[in-house]
């Protein structure tokens, strides 16, 4: 089965502690938003310590047009994407010319040609690389990107595939939007980039340690749930949509999805020793724990990434995967990668360290 040989991550340079983010929003929205003091409690309750942003905090105090922010997205995405690709390939001792396919996952900016085409002009990729840009999966994009790389490698067992997940969530911030969802988004979201190298069966790379093989994947969509999570597109850009029912939906909907997936693969939750969950937020992790009756330690990696980086949307689950891989799980350990996003949708990946 295809294997994940390496994962690299990159965090933008402007770190903001959670208390400074709360102070920023308090200053910006004071006198303009009803019940602001009550809403600000989400910053303290989020269990996030630090996040990383693409721009200095002063930049976000000003109003920026959609085109200005999107131009900045394209510029920084190309820069950050090149960095994370080079780090991933260096870890694997793979030459960029040997890559057969690029899967680029993002939701926080628009670019045609898409960013992976721009990355091909920055780095020395073969001109025959297959490009697979994926837009609109939001927080669900990380596991989905790995699943699509798995599909490609099953069809092309000699393939080397890079999955790049890149989100600059902060560039979508709307300083004039007094909607509660906008405020909650500022308490959760950060910026980040991750890159994973997925290789087909016929690729022989020496790693000297156990690596996660992709045993199976699954996708599921909750019918008529378009308003649960996503973007509202207006003249001045992207406005975040969050339904307060998300944790409740996870508790009711996720359990049968996970259990049926494991049953089809001859496994159960009792066999899973690594749970690689996208940490959408504190309440989302609590919903995972409640719905699946998971011990807290099984979500420790997801909690750690949330504390140190916040919710970075699609790359976040790959940050968690990298953290887990650095702990070097033993041969034979089983893991589930899970991420949930707009649609409302979910993606599961069954992993085995081999």
Image: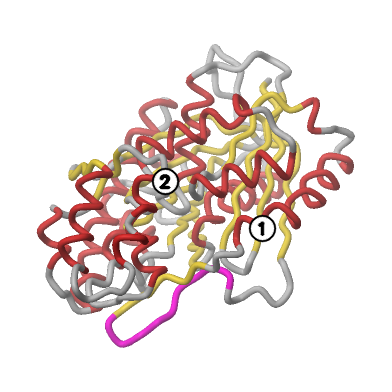
Give the residue displayed 51% in from the left and 44% down from the top: 279
Q: Position of residue 81 (x, y in %)?
A: 32, 49
Give the residue displayed 19% in from the left and 68% down from the top: 30
Q: Quadrant of the C terminus?
A: top right
Give the residue displayed 67% in from the left and 22% down from the top: 353
Magenta segment includes 253: no
Front one among 180 and 144: 180
Disc 2 designates what residue?
46
Query: CA separation, marks 2 and 1?
Result: 17 Å
| Secondary structure under the numbered disc 2 in the rendered image | loop
Q: Would you say residue 85 is visible in this rendering?
A: no
Q: Would you say residue 2 is visible in this rendering?
A: yes
Q: Quadrant of residue 199?
A: top right
Neighbor class of circle 1 (other Cα within 10 Å; few <14, some 14-19, many 20+) is some
Of mark 2 and mark 1, the one earlier in the sequence is 2
Neighbor class of circle 2 (other Cα within 10 Å; few <14, some 14-19, many 20+) is some
Question: From which residue to which does the magenta span run?
Answer: 228-236
Q: Which mark is residue 248?
A: 1
**Count of marks overlaid on the render:** 2
Q: Position of residue 194 (x, y in %)?
A: 41, 43
With 182 as the anchor, is 63 left or right in this view? left
Q: Position of residue 166 (x, y in %)?
A: 38, 53
Q: Is the stretch drawn in magenta largely helix, strand or loop?
A: strand
| Secondary structure under the numbered disc 1 in the rendered image | helix
Q: Position of residue 202 (x, y in %)?
A: 66, 32
Give the residue displayed 34% in from the left and 50% down from the top: 43
């Amino acid at each position: 089965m295809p294997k994940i040989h390496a994962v690299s991550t990159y965090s933008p340079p402007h770190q903001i502690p959670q208390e400074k983010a709360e102070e920023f929003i308090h200053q910006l929205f004071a006198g303009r938003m009803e019940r602001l003091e009550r809403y600000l409690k989400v910053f303290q309750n989020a269990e996030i310590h630090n996040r990383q942003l693409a721009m200095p905090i002063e930049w976000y105090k000003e109003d920026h047009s959609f085109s200005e922010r999107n131009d900045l997205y394209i510029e920084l995405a190309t820069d950050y994407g090149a960095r994370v690709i080079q780090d991933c390939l260096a870890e694997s001792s793979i030459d960029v010319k040997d890559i057969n396919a690029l899967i680029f996952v993002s939701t926080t900016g628009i670019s045609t040609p898409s960013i992976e085409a721009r990355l091909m002009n920055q780095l020395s990729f073969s001109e025959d690389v297959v490009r697979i840009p994926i837009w609109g999966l939001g927080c669900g994009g990380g596991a989905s990107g790995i699943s699509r790389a798995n599909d490609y490698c099953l069809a092309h067992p000699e393939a080397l595939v890079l999955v790049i997940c890149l989100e600059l969530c902060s560039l979508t911030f709307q300083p004039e939007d007094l909607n509660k969802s906008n405020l909650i988004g500022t308490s959760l979201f950060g910026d980040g980039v991750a890159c994973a190298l997925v290789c087909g069966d016929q690729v022989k790379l020496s790693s000297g340690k156990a690596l996660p093989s992709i045993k199976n994947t699954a996708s599921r969509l909750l019918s008529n749930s378009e308003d649960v999570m996503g973007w509202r597109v207006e003249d001045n850009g992207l406005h975040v949509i969050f339904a307060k029912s998300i944790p409740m939906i996870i508790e009711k909907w996720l359990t049968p999805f996970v259990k049926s997936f494991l049953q089809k693969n001859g496994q159960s939750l009792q066999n899973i020793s690594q749970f690689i969950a996208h940490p959408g937020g504190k309440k989302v992790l609590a919903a995972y724990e409640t719905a699946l009756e998971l011990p807290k330690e099984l979500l420790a990696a997801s909690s750690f990434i949330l504390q140190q980086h916040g919710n970075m949307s699609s790359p976040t689950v790959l940050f968690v995967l990298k953290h887990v891989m650095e702990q070097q799980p033993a041969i034979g350990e089983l893991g589930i990668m899970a991420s949930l996003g707009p649609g409302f949708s979910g993606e599961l990946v069954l992993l085995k360290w081999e």
